[in-house]
Amino acid sequence: MTTPYTKENVKTAYRQFGSLKAACAETGCPPYIAYIWLKKAKMLQSDDAVNYGTSSSRLGAEAEELFGKLVPHALPANKLLEKNCPSFDFDVYGITVDVKFGAVRSNGAWGFKTDKRKQFGADFYACFFTEEASLQNGYRCFLIPCEHVGHLSSVNLKPDTKSWLWDYEIDPENLSDIFMQMKEDV
């Protein structure tokens, strides 16, 4: 079976137009094929993850979008530095932030994978934890220094169990002010 599109012309169109939908329209490639090719090439933008990604990538993109609204002066790494920036999601006054989403899993805990294997880690994880698979009905926000959990490959926190991680829970409405305070101390 011969197709009018190739992996390379889909990637080229994506670089040119900056969206999965436009790249598919240009090349004639179905979005489910283009999505996996671009995902494996680490080229997808967070907007495409929201529209076409797996449920976990959509939720992660939703958390990134929420962080951007809560901290409007944050610079999105995916848009300004590198598409699908592998090290962090935002730069806030030189402080790098990796945004994480976590719904309660079958083990009763929130959790996320750390950047233990990444060459350059972020300064903080901004974690949005919820009881459901959406941030729409409420969430808890944590700002965890990456160095405090850097020796772990993943972090788990049960909503009803004591943990030192609770010291890092913050009011999301104060998130922007917290970064402003950190900026003044730098």
Image: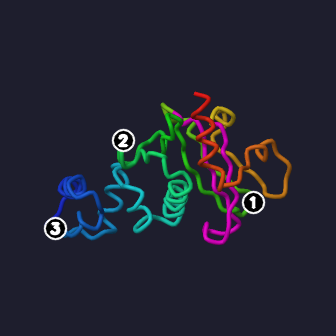
Residue 178: quadrant of the picture: top right
Residue shown at 59%/40% (left/top)?
180
Residue 135 percent coordinates (x, y): 61, 66
Residue matched to label 2: 81
Instruction: Look at the image and say whether residue 130 sits in the magenta stretch.
Output: yes
Quarter of the picture holding the C terminus: top right
3 or 1: tag closer to the N-terminus: 3
Residue 164 is left or right of residue 96, and the answer is right
Residue 117 percent coordinates (x, y): 53, 35
Q: Is residue 66 above or below residue 99?
A: below
Image depth: mark 3 or mark 1 in front: 1
Spatial separation of the CA atoms under disc 3 and disc 1: 45 Å
Q: Is residue 121 above or below residue 54?
A: above
The way the protein has been coloured in the rendering is: rainbow
Instruction: Look at the image and say whether residue 150 sits in the magenta stretch.
Output: no
Q: Secondary structure at mark 3?
A: loop
Spatial separation of the CA atoms under disc 3 and disc 2: 33 Å
Residue 174 percent coordinates (x, y): 66, 51
- Disc 1: CA contacts within 10 A as few (<14), some (14-19) or many (>=20): few
Residue matched to label 1: 107
- Highlighted range, magenta: 121-145
- Disc 3: CA contacts within 10 A as few (<14), some (14-19) or many (>=20): few
Image depth: mark 1 or mark 2 in front: 2
1 or 2: tag closer to the N-terminus: 2
Q: Amino acid at mark 3?
A: Thr
Q: Amino acid at mark 1?
A: Asn
Residue matched to label 3: 3
* Label total for image: 3
